[in-house]
Amino acid sequence: MSEQIASTGLVFDEPLLWERGRKGRQGFSMPVRDVEEFPLDSALLGDLPDLPDLSEPDVVRHYTRLSQWNFCVDTGMYPLGSCTMKYNPKVNEKVAALEGFTGAHPMAPSSLSQGVLKLMYDLEGILRDITGMDAVTLQPAAGAQGELTGMLLIHAYHRAKNATHTKIIVPDTAHGTNPASASLCGYRPVAVKSNENGILSTEAVSAVMDEDTAGIMLTNPNTLGLFEENVREIAQIVHDRGGQVYCDGANMNALMGMVDMGRTGVDVLHLNLHKTFSTPHGGGGPGAGPVCVKKHLEPFLPVPRVVFRNGAYGMDEEFPDSVGRLHAFYGNFGVMIKAYSYILTMGFTDLKKASQLAVLNANYIRKALTGVFHLPYDRFCMHECVFSDKFQREEKIITLDVAKRLMDFGFHPPTIYFPLVVDGAIMIEPTETESKETIDQFVSACKAIAREAKETPSILKEAPMKSKVKRLDETSAARRPCLAG
Amino acid sequence: MRYLPHTDEDISAMLEAVGVKCLDDLFPTVPESCRFIKEQTIPGPFTEWELNGHMDLLAKKQGVSSGYRRFIGAGSYEHYIPASVSTLLGRSEFVTPYTPYQPEISQGTLQAIYEYQTLVARLLGMEVANASLYDGASALAEALLMAVRITGKRKVAVSSAIHPHYRRVAETYFRPSGIEVVTLPCLENGRTDVATIDQFQDLAAVAVQSPNFFGCIEDLKGICERCDSNDLLSVISFTEPLAYGLLKNPGRQGAHIVCGEGRSFGLPLWFGGPGLGMFACRTKYMRNMPGRLIGKALDREGKSGFVLTLATREQHIRREKATSNICTNSSHCALAAVIYMATLGGTGMRELATLNRDKSEYLKKELRKAGFRIPFDAPTFNEFVVEFPTGFEQTHKRLLDKGIVAGLPLASFYPAMAGKYLLCVTETVSRNDMDELVREIRS
């Protein structure tokens, strides 16, 4: 096979939906009217909705063509760092579509929802076990809402002790959403720099942790893909000065069965079911961001909580210290089913193996690309490794060019320009579901691109060449936004 | 394990390339004190066949529509989902990518969500809509936070007829930062008593829901005008977007920000989630909006395409000064909504909305005829409140045993509303179902 696995094929242009519409078409099987008409007060009556009318085949062809313009996990390797783009098992979709689940009404009496409630109750238990924490809420709808929940829990914990704080420590290797989540709780993020090894030192934390600081928001493994080796000592420092330790667990895919998060000293941890637990990313959601806590934070968890009492499952609102509610109902149950199904399919041994292989794949790439791209922190990484464009910049080639050129070779680009702590970062997370052959192809592509950067840099500047559209002008798009047609 | 492609030979070769002997050796940076050592209790592994059996058993413990007739909505409305919608949604190319950070190879998601933004803006009568938020509740919280940012005032007024769960979510978001929430009472007719806002100083916004939690259609024009004359922002929430297939939309009536739940459009009930936070506003507030936005762009050859835009509002760039912390949103749900809207079209949306209202009016009429009181006389869309006589709890229970969910008792949300039930009728309920409900209640 040639180096470039991407080929060109017949791809269709497709107009905007409303350009396809013709009044008088109908794509919906309208139920038979079996009641009389009840006139509506003309003061309430709106204009006919301004939506195009299409037939069912029109709609199907339109969105099928659009779908073919997307790169996805099912078409190729998608090594988007910190996003854990692993394979999304198909049986998960099948079981999530069972009528008992899709038809579960959230306001129905709990006697009609025993299957759903049992699934949630059991999933909480599983997540508790795999993290080593003491209690879980499944309510947050995504990672960032899980972070917010974590901050609310810490805020409520301090409030119960009549303590107020204005600051929270956020390392330079934390996830991008962390500062915004903290500020919703009125905390000002205080930046701490990672050390020469890319991790936090106890000294750096000790220097900023004071009585006015609510705690720390760690990401572990951090966004350099490195395990925070001093996490226990850091937690001790924070606890000694009255703070709480929040851990962003978006990168849990490196740690299943290997690390007991409970033992690392963290008080709150969020998980991303759409990363570690294989639920699909859906083009940007829906996700789910369960939050796991230690015993002392359990009273503050969001309500309602799933309970099992007198032989039946139910929802209980009566937790007076609770932070409140994060979701209109109980969180993204449709996502929970898929994560639960994944965990049961894997079992503990294969979950552990998944983490080990995710780490193996990342370290294999780290070794294979050393010298091809600049590796700012040359040490054992976890599930992802971070390079930079330092070598290529000599030829005026930057990370963006490398990323765009990777598309022509048939790969989704890695996460780029993040973490900010590495200038021109290229953050590669292969996940465990990519085979050695695929990774070897990816490595060959990277090497070929690095060669091109030296020999024929103009090719990289023109990339991507095989995609449906060429590089898009994002600057003009933001200057004069056109957000609706 | 079928999801893990590595053969033993692959693993050996890769370990050798990395320079270690076994998989455990890949974790030298994890201190012993952090290792997972406890006994594991996680069930599995299940074969695919075992898993299907296990999940079938759980699903069968559910009381769902094939065996039950449910007259409940309360923020979650049962609508028929066309097979074409589910089929398109199930395409891997839509299910398995992530946020379209690389536009050249994500044009499918980008154009679809641009179409979503456009149709949502049109349906609600607004100028811009974002690419989605989590659900209607967090959309309300985000809308009020946006109003606080725009006005610099830290007090908001929220109608007591907004879904109680939505109000609780907003309060949860606001509590640590000290944003004050005042609650507006309701009138006898089931609508919000907006005249009461005149008594508050320094309000950033007034939020109402229409149709509200009791199903009543609010006087949005009156509310928006009062907001304008008090120089504060009107935030219009909703739980049933189908209502705007029939009713005058909030934009036509002067709303500044409109936010609500879009799950009715092509998504299953799924015990309430995932939902779809719809969010729209006037262009002048665009740069204060939370969430992702997709805009038109040209490529180097002048060909038209789409990109994520106005990212400088967002958390990964503006950090703590971002307009929201949201990252992953409800993109696939937004896709469901746009495909559903395309399938209905404007004509179909009007017809389906009319049918929902007429069916609901039919049940209302039949219940009235049977001697039950409809306590609120404001007009409604597809749900309404009924007052049942003392002791109805027993009837409600008896009907449940017969597979009929005869509405939602309101007393647990509003203690003063004992005996009042919220009933919902959509196109999935037949006239026979309604006649049987009335017969059973009377017997």
Image (cartoon, coloured by chain):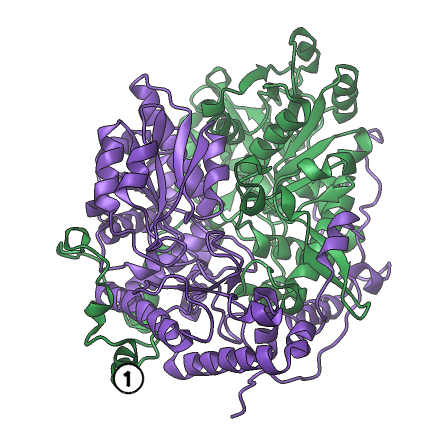
Percent from the top left, x then y, of residue A307?
28, 38
Q: Residue at x 64, y 32 (%)?
A: B237
Task: Please tell me whether residue A111 is drawn above or below residue A55 in the rendered image.
Answer: above
Q: Is residue A182 left or right of residue B202?
A: left
- Relative height, residue A296 to residue A286 (above, below): above
Residue A334: image x %, image y %? Answer: 45, 53
In front of the other: A5 or B159 = A5
At a point 31% along the width and 64% down the height, the residue shown is A379
Q: Which residue is mark 1?
A: B13
Where does residue A202 sit, x and y in percent of width and height?
26, 42
Relative image position of residue A180 (x, y in whole percent): 50, 38
What residue occupies the far front of the structure in this picture?
A394
Shown in purple, the chain is: A
Q: Amino acid at mark 1?
A: Ala
The chain to which mark 1 is attached is B
- Identify whether A120 is placed above or below B307: above
Q: Is residue B245 visible?
A: no
The correct choice, above or below, for B132 with respect to A251 in the image is above
* B107 left or right, relative to A270: right
Q: Quadrant of the N terminus of chain B?
A: bottom left
- In the rendered structure, the colour chosen for chain B is green
Total marks drawn? Answer: 1
